Amino acid sequence: MIRKTLFTRMLAVGLLAAALYPQLNAQAKTPEPPKLKVGDTAPDFKLKYFDGNDLKDVSLSQYRGNKNVVLAFYVFAFTGG
């Protein structure tokens, strides 16, 4: 009797997991990055920067139409490694 109850519960959990797996898997996937070509307008983004005192938000849209923007990424900068 205990084996039958245990088997029934395990089967129910397995069926529930199988039913929910596609939803969980869809949420875990990251969106595909935008495909840009030379000359395309860069998509807006927001990041934090340190102005010497504290962290502040900055977005690309703040500079659109006003100034030219150059982005540079330094891998492992300021990490000591």
Image (cartoon, rainbow, N blue to C red):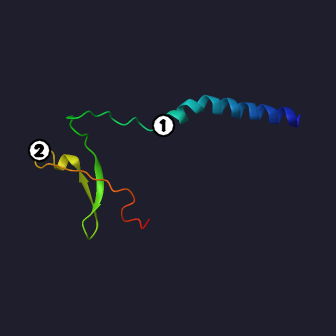
Residue positioned 28% across, 67% down in the render: 54
Q: Amino acid at mark 2?
A: Gly
Q: State whether residue 70 is above or below residue 55.
A: above
Q: State whether residue 47 is above or below residue 78.
A: above
Residue 38 location, quadrant: top left
Find disc 2 in the rendering and name its residue: 65
Q: Secondary structure at mark 2?
A: loop
Name the side, left or right, on which 61 lies relative to 5: left
Name the side, left or right, on which 22 lies relative to 11: left
Residue positioned 11% across, 44% down in the render: 65
Q: Amino acid at mark 1?
A: Lys
Residue 4 image point, x, y percent: 85, 32
Q: Secondary structure at mark 1?
A: loop
Q: CA distance from mark 2 to mark 1?
A: 34 Å
Q: In what quadrant of the picture does the N terminus appear?
A: top right
In depth, the one of 37 and 65 nearer the eye is 37
Instruction: Kindly give the residue lying farthest to the bottom in the view shown.
Output: 53
Residue 14 image point, x, y percent: 70, 32
Q: In what quadrant of the picture does the C terminus appear?
A: bottom left
Residue positioned 14% across, 48% down in the render: 68
Look at the numbered discs 2 and 1 and tell me whether their residues touch, using CB distance below 8 Å. no
Residue 36 image point, x, y percent: 28, 34
Q: Does label 2 or label 1 sit earlier along the sequence?
A: 1
Looking at the rendered structure, which numbered label has been put on residue 29? 1
Residue 51 image point, x, y percent: 24, 66
Looking at the rendered structure, which numbered label has been put on residue 57? none
**Residue density around tag 2, few if under 14, some if 14–19, many if 20 or more, within 10 Å:** few
Name the side, left or right, on which 18 lies relative to 5: left
**Residue density around tag 1, few if under 14, some if 14–19, many if 20 or more, within 10 Å:** few
